[in-house]
Amino acid sequence: MLPFPDRLQAGQLLSRQLEKYAGRRDVIVLALPRGGVPVGYAIAASLAAMLAAIA
């Protein structure tokens, strides 16, 4: 069993640990397309940061 019900919730919980980066213009969240985009999206949305998917 995974510790999170889905990747979106995992990103939301992780973003709490990254709150000190919220609102900064120099922050970019990088996400791997193979399952990392939902996590990265949740983090970027929470921090008001840019999101980039990398291969």
Image (cartoon, helix red, strand yellow):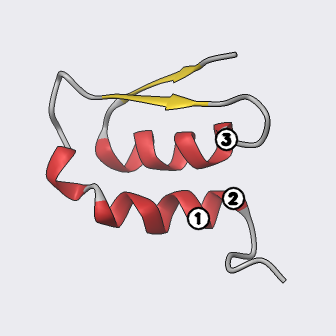
Q: Residue at x 60, y 49 (%)?
A: 39
Q: In the visual, does 19 lie left or right of 44?
A: left
Tell me the element at label 3: loop
Q: Which residue is mark 1?
A: 10
Q: Is residue 18 left or right of residue 6?
A: left
Marks 2 and 3 close (CB-CB < 8 Å): yes
- Residue at left offset 19%, top offset 22%: 26
Placement of the C terminus among the 4 image quadrants: top right
Q: Amino acid at mark 2?
A: Arg
Q: Quadrant of the N terminus?
A: bottom right
**52 lies left or right of 27:** right
Q: Residue type at mark 1?
A: Ala
**Is the residue 3 above or below the residue 54 in the image?**
below
Q: Read off the residue under disc 3.
A: 36
Residue with the most extreme top position:
55
The residue tagged with tag 2: helix, strand or loop? helix
Q: Are marks 3 and 1 in contact (CB under 8 Å)?
A: no
Residue furthest to the right in view is 1
Q: Position of residue 34 (x, y in %)?
A: 79, 35
Residue position for label 2: 7
Residue 26, numbered circle: none
Q: Spatial distance from mark 2 to mark 3, Cα to Cα?
A: 8 Å
Question: What's under tag 3, amino acid-wise?
Answer: Gly
